[in-house]
Structure formats: C-alpha cells, structure tokens
Image (tube, rainbow, N blue to C red):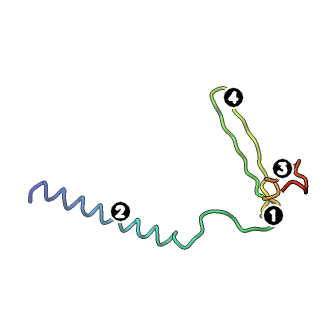
Amino acid sequence: MSSGFFIFLVSSAILILLIGRAISVVQKEGNEPVRGSEPGEGVHTIHAEYSSGFSGHSTTYTIPRDPQAYAKRFVPKQRTDNAK
C-alpha cells in the first residue's frame, strides 16, 4: 500500500467523522431556541466588567423581562403627546 493511498484513507475517515458529528450537533440543537428569554415579571441582571491595563470598569445592568417595560426604556423622557 502506498503512502499516498494511506493518507487518503485516513483523511477520508476523519472527514466522515467530522461530517457525522456536524450533522449530529445540528439535529440536536436545531429544535431549541438559542436566543432570548420568555417574557414575565422581574428583571434580568447583567454584570459587565473589563480591564484595560492599569484601569478597568464594572457595571450592572437591569433589563425588565416584560416586553412593554423594556420598550418604554427607548422612549425619550422629553416626549410630549403632541409630538408624533
């Protein structure tokens, strides 16, 4: 058996395994939603931190789970009922 044929067989076997694994992952995760959360009461709490050399910053965001309360955050506070 030549070395070229052996390399071809090993490469083909690896490729078949990778394709099989990819198909398996897509089938397993394809039916599940990966983004978002169910609407409800309460808030999500997000902690954000970063460090840049000698300094950094840390903050906490609270995001309402209710879609209407979330949308109200984007309406300017100075808005009047006459301005449409």
Figure quadrant of the N terminus: bottom left
Q: Is residue 16 left or right of residue 72?
A: left
Q: Can you tell which of label 1 and label 4 is closer to the viewer? A: 1
Q: Amino acid at mark 4?
A: Ser
Name the one closer to the observer, 75 or 63. 75
Q: Choose mark 3 or mark 4, whichever is in front.
A: 3
The residue that mark 3 highlights is: 76
For mark 4, what is the residue? 55
Residue, far right:
81
Q: Report the Cα–Cα distance between label 1 and label 3.
A: 15 Å
Quadrant housing residue 18:
bottom left
Q: Earlier in the sequence, mark 1 or mark 3?
A: 1
Amino acid of disc 3: Pro
**Mark 2 crowd level (few <14, some 14–19, many ≥20, 10 Å Cα):** few
- Residue 33 placement (x, y as % from top left): 60, 68
Residue located beneath label 2 in the image = 18
Determine whether 38 is above or below 11 in the image.
Answer: below
Query: With respect to residue 56, does 34 lie above or below?
Result: below
**Residue for badge 1:** 68
Q: Position of residue 54 (x, y in %)?
A: 66, 26
Q: Secondary structure at mark 4?
A: strand
The mark that comes first in sequence, 2 or 1, is 2
Q: Amino acid at mark 1?
A: Gln
